[in-house]
Amino acid sequence: MRAVQILNPSGEVTMPRPDRPRIMCVANQKGGVGKTTTTVNLAVALALHGNRVLVVDLDPQGNASTGLNVPHHAGVPDVYDCLIDNVPLAEVAQSVEGIPDLWCVPATIDLAGAEIELVSVVARESRLARAIAGHPAEFDYVFIDCPPSLGLLTVNALCAAQEVLIPIQCEYYALEGLNQLINNINLVRQHLNPTLEVSTILLTMYDRRTRLADAVEQDVRNHFGDKVLQSVIPRNVRVSEAPSYGQSVMTYDPGSRGATSYFEAAQEIAMRGVKESVGRNV
């Protein structure tokens, strides 16, 4: 039953659509906290339940492209062409096989040189924002998967987004780098993108057997309050296996704890978007 609810073959189960596109940047300069896994699985969960979703892979490693089974070998038109050569995003976006309302802008190894090439480009911080704004299609969600650094690519993502989603691994080191990330987000808000806000914190790789995970969770909830999703992503081998089959855990093993957790997190994000728009209208 759980698997059927997540795969939603009949299309009956829907997550509410926001009244305007939500552009979410998934960022954390610490590597291995689950940025790409979170991006891919939330995007698939929302697309399977009635939302139109675009994933922009901004990490030169191209892991989000791998997880969605989108070709990203050398020579494939990618996000690099949009940033450096002003190629329209619509020409680069590829539809994701088997998931009708999901598109992905892949990243190839060319993107590794973009950090250096962007330095001399005019309006270098807003190249991605302009590319997304120029896309003719109307998306409900745009997820930008950032590299594990605070360089120009991440700054481009922060300038293009309205919301930041921060995945936090339930370990002590994850908290250490968080302060620097928040400072950078505040700098971008002050100088480049005044509408930017940290809207969502997602706890990942949660191991219920350890006191440390519990302590980290309490610290994060005390500090960030309502921004922390109630759904927590557990350590789950199915989540790690799925990319090797070019799939998200939602389609690879929809009955697993990992898939259920990401499904619940996507539901929470969708419900929050609707509440926020109602609050704005009031």
Image (spheres, rainbow, N blue to C red):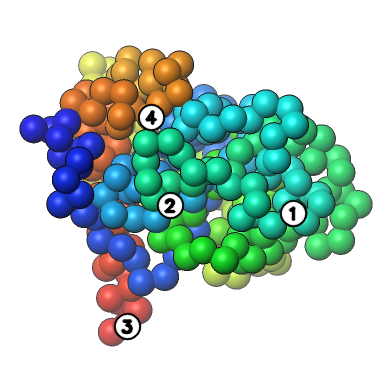
Q: Position of residue 96 (x, y in %)?
A: 46, 39
Residue 122 falls left or right of residue 5? right
Image quadrant of residue 87?
bottom right
**Marks 3 and 4: in contact by CB < 8 Å?**
no
Residue 28 falls left or right of residue 232? right
Q: Which residue is mark 3?
A: 281
Answer yes or no: is residue 21 visible: yes
Q: Which residue is mark 4?
A: 248
Q: Residue at x 49, y 50 (%)?
A: 54
- Mark 3 vs mark 1: which is more N-terminal? 1
Q: What's the distance in space between the residues labelled 2 and 4, CA to CA? A: 15 Å
Disc 3 marks a residue whose amino acid type is: Asn
Q: Residue at x 79, y 41 (%)?
A: 114
Q: Count neighbours of disc 2 (C-alpha within 10 A) and say few if under 14, some if 14 to 19, many if 20 or more.
A: many
**Marks 2 and 3: in contact by CB < 8 Å?**
no
Q: What's the distance in space between the residues labelled 3 and 2, CA to CA? A: 24 Å
Furthest toward the bottom, the residue is 282
Q: Nearer the viewer, mark 3 or mark 1?
A: 1
- Mark 3 vs mark 2: which is more N-terminal? 2
- Mark 1 vs mark 4: which is more N-terminal? 1
- Mark 2 vs mark 4: which is more N-terminal? 2
